[in-house]
Image (spheres, grey):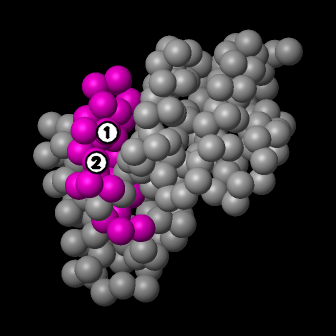
Amino acid sequence: MAHRGVSSSIALTFDDGPDPTYTPLVLNILAHYGVHATFFCVGEQVQAYPDLALQESQQSNAVENHSWSHVNLTVLPPDIVREQIQSTSIEIKQATGITPELFRPPYGSKNENVNNIARELGLTQILWSIDTQDWQQPGVDQIVKTVLTKIKGGDIILMHDGGGNRAETVQALALIISELQQQGFTFIVL
């Protein structure tokens, strides 16, 4: 089956890690299939598991900013928003040696305040085009179906490697990658 759309490039993204249980499993699957992804990491998780953030980076994945503690930044004063974002970039740089260039606001919630601060800190905001809803644990089949029925070139797929039980995500990931590779899609890092 041929892929839809002009481009065959798509991006896998993972939020809320690194997580000591699920991030290594995700990294193993990515390595097995020769695929790289973009990890939007929570600062306090990077602080707790800097070795996992480094492993993500060393395996040619992007390690990017997802705020310090995964709060809705739109309800916070500017100084706290700045601290949430800036502290995470500093922590990621300390763990990986690379300063993040991308920022994904928690819950995709943004406003002028969040937009301005991210821009001032030199970060480009990235959301997603396909939300697998994997955090709701809808079942492996549903996660796979969500991606495969919606996918087109240029899509950014949202999945999670942290923030809860991600066993379904891990199981779905190999099925998704295998099928999309068979369809001719290539995976890019944002």
What element does badge 1 sit on?
A: helix
| Whether residue 118 is visible | no
Residue 66 drawn in magenta? yes
Residue 171 drawn in magenta? no
Q: Nearer the viewer, residue 52 or 41?
A: 52
What residue type is disc 2 on?
Answer: Tyr
How packed mark 2 is, by other alpha carbons closer than 10 Å (few <14, some 14-19, many 20 or more), is some
Q: Which residue is mark 2?
A: 49
Residue at position x 43%, y 34% in the image? 24
What residue type is disc 1 on?
Answer: Leu
Q: Nearer the viewer, residue 89 or 55?
A: 55
In this view, the residue farthest toward the front is: 21
Q: Which residue is mark 1?
A: 52
Q: Position of residue 84 (x, y in %)?
A: 28, 69
Q: Position of residue 93 (x, y in %)?
A: 17, 45
| Image quadrant in which you'd find residue 177 | top right
Measure how far apart labels 1 and 2 are at the Cα level. 6 Å
Residue 184 in the image: above or below residue 56: above
Q: Position of residue 187 (x, y in %)?
A: 55, 24
Q: Are marks 1 and 2 in contact (CB under 8 Å)?
A: yes
Q: Position of residue 114 (x, y in %)?
A: 37, 72
State which quarter of the image contains the N terminus: top right
| Whether residue 23 is visible | yes
What element does badge 2 sit on?
A: loop
| Magenta span of residues | 45-70
Left or right: 150 with respect to 98? right
